[in-house]
Amino acid sequence: MLTLLTAALLSFSDPAGDARGDGGYILPTRPPVSADALDLRSFQATPQAAGMRFTVGLGRIENPWGAPSGFSAGVTDIFVGRGLGGERTLDDLRLRTTGGGWTYHLRVTGFGSTLTQVPEGGGTPVPLPAPTVRLEGTRLVIDAAIPPGEYAYWVTSSVYSPLSPDGLLRPVTTPGPTHLQAGRADAPVPVDVLLPSGETTPFTQGTLAPVGQTRDTRVLILAALGGLGLLLVVGATVTLWRRGG
């Protein structure tokens, strides 16, 4: 469940043992990848210097492809937004957002990581400096050039494949030792998503709810200032009317 540790640190937990999509995904066996290595367990977000630090906890760390980073079982995607506006499709994961859209997208693999940003007003995401990633036990610690602030997050874990251009092993319906097998051809790509409730809705309906700040506080502040300004105008008008009377 969500725990507010401080005004600057957000921490979320995710149920263990749910890294099989809707429950019926069958993981590849060549090379072997355990469900624990793809199982999201926790997520933390905190400002760090001029950027944001994200810490992703997994069930275990495995390196089936021998990456120099020490991990290569999965692909971790982190989508970051303000809760209003932004992109609604989670790139190539066959999922859509609820509760707003994203502006920043981090993709973390054992062979390299990327960060992109959607321009204001929409359009093709542009690359930003690559995040730095290090291992701490079974956690990935990710420092990214995202302005410090409160955000909404959509976090997913997928199977890594060096044979696809984007590093994602997509589900198919045919069995095979190198396949990620699912019950339908258009099944979502991730095998686990950050969802403290443990629902399988993302895999049955294709939508993922955010965690974190799901409302744009900037809009709320502007609305409050507008309301305050209106009250001041009304008060001044009443005062002038009384004086005139």
Image: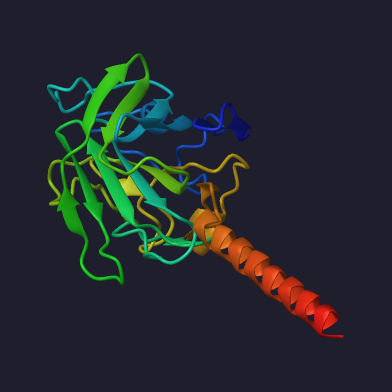
| Count of all numbered marks drawn on residues in the image | 0
- The residue sitting at 28% across, 52% down in the picture is 170
Q: Is residue 65 left or right of residue 104?
A: left
- The residue sitting at 15% across, 36% down in the picture is 112
Q: Is residue 178 left or right of residue 226?
A: left
In the rendered image, the residue lying farthest to the bottom is: 245
Q: Position of residue 67 (x, y in %)?
A: 14, 25
Task: Give the camera-side residue of 111 and 48.
Answer: 48
In this view, 18 is above or below 60 = below
- The residue sitting at 12% across, 46% down in the picture is 163
> Image quadrant of residue 64?
top left
> What colour scheme does the image use?
rainbow
In this view, 85 is above or below 70 = below
The answer to whether any part of residue 200 appears in the image is: yes
Q: Is residue 191 left or right of residue 113?
A: right
Q: Is residue 181 left or right of residue 197?
A: left
Task: Give the camera-side residue of 176 and 141.
Answer: 141
- The residue sitting at 55% across, 53% down in the picture is 214
Q: Position of residue 84 (x, y in %)?
A: 48, 63
In this view, 80 is above or below 239 = above
Q: Position of residue 155 (x, y in %)?
A: 42, 44
The answer to whether any part of residue 175 appears in the image is: no
In which quadrant will I find the N terminus? top right
> Image quadrant of residue 33?
top left
In which quadrant will I find the C terminus? bottom right
Q: Position of residue 61 (x, y in %)?
A: 32, 21
Task: Give the camera-side residue of 125 and 23.
Answer: 125
In the rendered image, the residue lying farthest to the top is: 137
